[in-house]
Amino acid sequence: MKKVAIIMGSDSDLPIVEKGINVLKEYEVPFEVHVYSAHRTPVETAEFVKNAKDNGFGVIIAAAGMAAHLAGAIAANTVIPVIGIPVSCKNTGGMDALLATVQMPSGIPVATVAIDGAANAAILAIQMLALSDDGLYAKLVEARKKGTEKVLAKNKEIEEKFNK
Protein backbone atom coordinates (compact mmCIF):
# COMPACT_ATOMS: atom_id res chain seq x y z
CA MET A 1 0.00 0.00 0.00
CA LYS A 2 1.21 3.48 -0.83
CA LYS A 3 1.90 5.84 2.07
CA VAL A 4 0.39 9.24 2.75
CA ALA A 5 2.73 12.14 3.49
CA ILE A 6 1.36 14.73 5.87
CA ILE A 7 3.31 17.95 5.76
CA MET A 8 2.49 20.92 7.93
CA GLY A 9 4.01 24.36 7.64
CA SER A 10 4.44 24.69 11.41
CA ASP A 11 4.16 22.44 14.43
CA SER A 12 1.39 24.79 15.60
CA ASP A 13 -0.76 23.08 12.92
CA LEU A 14 -0.46 19.72 14.70
CA PRO A 15 -3.73 19.92 16.70
CA ILE A 16 -5.60 20.27 13.39
CA VAL A 17 -3.51 17.69 11.53
CA GLU A 18 -3.96 15.09 14.29
CA LYS A 19 -7.61 14.70 13.30
CA GLY A 20 -6.45 13.41 9.92
CA ILE A 21 -3.71 11.28 11.47
CA ASN A 22 -6.35 9.56 13.59
CA VAL A 23 -8.41 8.76 10.49
CA LEU A 24 -5.39 7.28 8.71
CA LYS A 25 -4.67 5.15 11.80
CA GLU A 26 -8.29 3.99 11.91
CA TYR A 27 -8.05 2.82 8.28
CA GLU A 28 -4.56 1.36 8.86
CA VAL A 29 -3.03 3.51 6.12
CA PRO A 30 0.73 4.00 6.45
CA PHE A 31 1.83 7.62 6.74
CA GLU A 32 4.65 9.93 7.68
CA VAL A 33 4.33 13.37 9.28
CA HIS A 34 6.78 16.21 8.64
CA VAL A 35 7.15 19.94 9.27
CA TYR A 36 8.38 21.76 6.17
CA SER A 37 7.79 25.40 5.34
CA ALA A 38 7.26 26.74 1.84
CA HIS A 39 9.14 29.85 2.90
CA ARG A 40 11.64 28.75 5.56
CA THR A 41 12.66 25.35 4.13
CA PRO A 42 11.89 25.56 0.40
CA VAL A 43 14.87 23.41 -0.63
CA GLU A 44 14.08 20.66 1.88
CA THR A 45 10.39 20.76 0.98
CA ALA A 46 11.12 20.41 -2.74
CA GLU A 47 13.65 17.63 -2.09
CA PHE A 48 11.15 15.62 -0.05
CA VAL A 49 8.40 16.09 -2.62
CA LYS A 50 10.55 15.30 -5.65
CA ASN A 51 11.50 11.98 -4.04
CA ALA A 52 8.03 11.17 -2.69
CA LYS A 53 7.01 8.71 -5.41
CA ASP A 54 10.29 6.80 -5.15
CA ASN A 55 9.84 6.70 -1.38
CA GLY A 56 6.44 5.00 -1.64
CA PHE A 57 4.03 7.90 -1.25
CA GLY A 58 0.77 7.97 -3.20
CA VAL A 59 -0.81 11.15 -1.81
CA ILE A 60 0.51 14.23 -0.03
CA ILE A 61 -1.56 16.23 2.44
CA ALA A 62 -0.32 19.76 3.11
CA ALA A 63 -1.60 21.88 6.00
CA ALA A 64 -0.79 25.57 6.30
CA GLY A 65 -2.36 28.79 7.49
CA MET A 66 -2.05 32.47 6.70
CA ALA A 67 -0.16 32.78 3.37
CA ALA A 68 -0.68 29.00 2.94
CA HIS A 69 1.71 28.53 0.04
CA LEU A 70 2.76 25.06 1.17
CA ALA A 71 0.26 22.97 -0.82
CA GLY A 72 0.94 24.95 -3.97
CA ALA A 73 4.70 24.75 -3.54
CA ILE A 74 4.39 21.01 -3.07
CA ALA A 75 2.09 20.58 -6.08
CA ALA A 76 4.54 22.54 -8.22
CA ASN A 77 7.16 19.86 -7.57
CA THR A 78 5.18 16.65 -8.11
CA VAL A 79 2.36 15.03 -10.05
CA ILE A 80 1.35 12.97 -6.99
CA PRO A 81 -2.08 14.15 -5.81
CA VAL A 82 -1.85 16.96 -3.26
CA ILE A 83 -4.62 17.73 -0.78
CA GLY A 84 -4.50 21.11 0.92
CA ILE A 85 -5.83 21.81 4.39
CA PRO A 86 -6.26 25.56 4.94
CA VAL A 87 -5.61 26.17 8.63
CA SER A 88 -7.53 28.80 10.56
CA CYS A 89 -5.89 31.71 12.32
CA LYS A 90 -7.24 34.29 14.74
CA ASN A 91 -6.91 37.26 12.35
CA THR A 92 -8.90 36.00 9.36
CA GLY A 93 -10.47 32.75 10.49
CA GLY A 94 -8.62 30.91 7.74
CA MET A 95 -10.21 32.59 4.72
CA ASP A 96 -6.79 33.77 3.55
CA ALA A 97 -5.45 30.21 3.78
CA LEU A 98 -8.51 28.83 2.00
CA LEU A 99 -8.15 31.20 -0.93
CA ALA A 100 -4.37 30.73 -1.14
CA THR A 101 -4.81 26.94 -1.16
CA VAL A 102 -7.69 26.68 -3.61
CA GLN A 103 -6.63 29.33 -6.16
CA MET A 104 -4.03 27.38 -8.12
CA PRO A 105 -2.97 27.98 -11.72
CA SER A 106 -4.15 25.63 -14.44
CA GLY A 107 -2.05 22.48 -14.58
CA ILE A 108 -1.00 22.57 -10.90
CA PRO A 109 -4.08 21.35 -9.01
CA VAL A 110 -4.46 21.15 -5.25
CA ALA A 111 -7.55 19.36 -3.97
CA THR A 112 -8.71 21.55 -1.11
CA VAL A 113 -10.85 20.63 1.88
CA ALA A 114 -12.61 22.90 4.35
CA ILE A 115 -10.75 25.15 6.75
CA ASP A 116 -9.28 22.84 9.42
CA GLY A 117 -10.74 19.88 7.49
CA ALA A 118 -8.00 17.35 8.25
CA ALA A 119 -10.39 14.42 8.72
CA ASN A 120 -11.83 14.95 5.24
CA ALA A 121 -8.32 15.36 3.82
CA ALA A 122 -7.46 11.94 5.21
CA ILE A 123 -10.67 10.41 3.85
CA LEU A 124 -9.96 11.90 0.43
CA ALA A 125 -6.41 10.51 0.51
CA ILE A 126 -7.83 7.09 1.44
CA GLN A 127 -10.33 7.30 -1.44
CA MET A 128 -7.46 8.02 -3.84
CA LEU A 129 -5.48 5.05 -2.54
CA ALA A 130 -8.60 2.86 -2.63
CA LEU A 131 -8.70 3.17 -6.42
CA SER A 132 -6.06 0.44 -6.47
CA ASP A 133 -6.73 -1.24 -3.11
CA ASP A 134 -9.92 -3.28 -2.74
CA GLY A 135 -9.45 -3.66 1.02
CA LEU A 136 -9.41 0.09 1.55
CA TYR A 137 -12.38 0.44 -0.79
CA ALA A 138 -14.36 -2.06 1.32
CA LYS A 139 -13.48 -0.15 4.51
CA LEU A 140 -14.76 3.09 2.98
CA VAL A 141 -18.01 1.43 1.90
CA GLU A 142 -18.48 0.01 5.40
CA ALA A 143 -17.82 3.41 7.00
CA ARG A 144 -20.44 5.02 4.78
CA LYS A 145 -22.92 2.28 5.71
CA LYS A 146 -22.27 2.89 9.42
CA GLY A 147 -22.68 6.64 8.90
CA THR A 148 -26.05 6.06 7.24
CA GLU A 149 -27.17 3.76 10.05
CA LYS A 150 -26.16 6.32 12.67
CA VAL A 151 -28.17 9.10 11.02
CA LEU A 152 -31.21 6.86 10.55
CA ALA A 153 -31.08 5.85 14.23
CA LYS A 154 -31.00 9.53 15.25
CA ASN A 155 -33.87 10.21 12.86
CA LYS A 156 -35.90 7.45 14.47
CA GLU A 157 -35.29 8.93 17.94
CA ILE A 158 -36.40 12.38 16.79
CA GLU A 159 -39.46 11.02 14.98
CA GLU A 160 -40.55 9.04 18.03
CA LYS A 161 -40.11 12.08 20.28
CA PHE A 162 -41.94 14.63 18.11
CA ASN A 163 -44.11 12.84 15.52
CA LYS A 164 -46.88 11.33 17.60
Image (cartoon, rainbow, N blue to C red):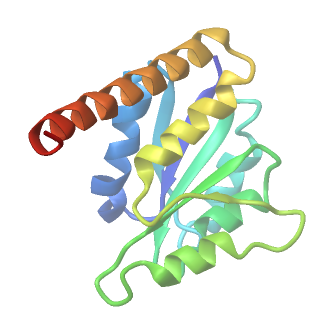
Identify whether 100 is placed above or below 117. below
Q: Quick check: 98 left or right of 109?
A: left
Q: Position of residue 118 (x, y in %)?
A: 43, 50
Q: Name the residue located 61 percent from the left edge and 78 percent from the top edge.
A: 100
Q: Name the residue located 74 percent from the left edge and 18 percent from the top edge.
A: 132
Residue 66 visible in the current orientation: no
**Quarter occupied by residue 116:** bottom left
Judging depth in this view, the residue of 64 and 20 nearest the camera is 20
Judging depth in this view, the residue of 46 and 73 nearest the camera is 73
Q: Name the residue located 38 percent from the left edge and 22 percent from the top edge.
A: 146
Residue 96 visible in the current orientation: yes
Q: Position of residue 49 (x, y in %)?
A: 70, 48
Q: Position of residue 88 (x, y in %)?
A: 37, 73
Judging depth in this view, the residue of 141 and 40 nearest the camera is 141
Residue extending farthest left: 161
Name the quarter where the C terminus is drawn: top left
Q: Position of residue 70 (x, y in %)?
A: 59, 66
Judging depth in this view, the residue of 159 and 1 nearest the camera is 159
Residue extending farthest top: 135
Residue extending farthest right: 107
Q: Quick check: 12 left or right of 119?
A: left
Residue extending farthest front: 164
Q: Name the residue located 61 percent from the left edge and 71 percent from the top edge.
A: 101
Identify whether 58 is placed above or below 45. above
Name the quarter where the N terminus is drawn: top right
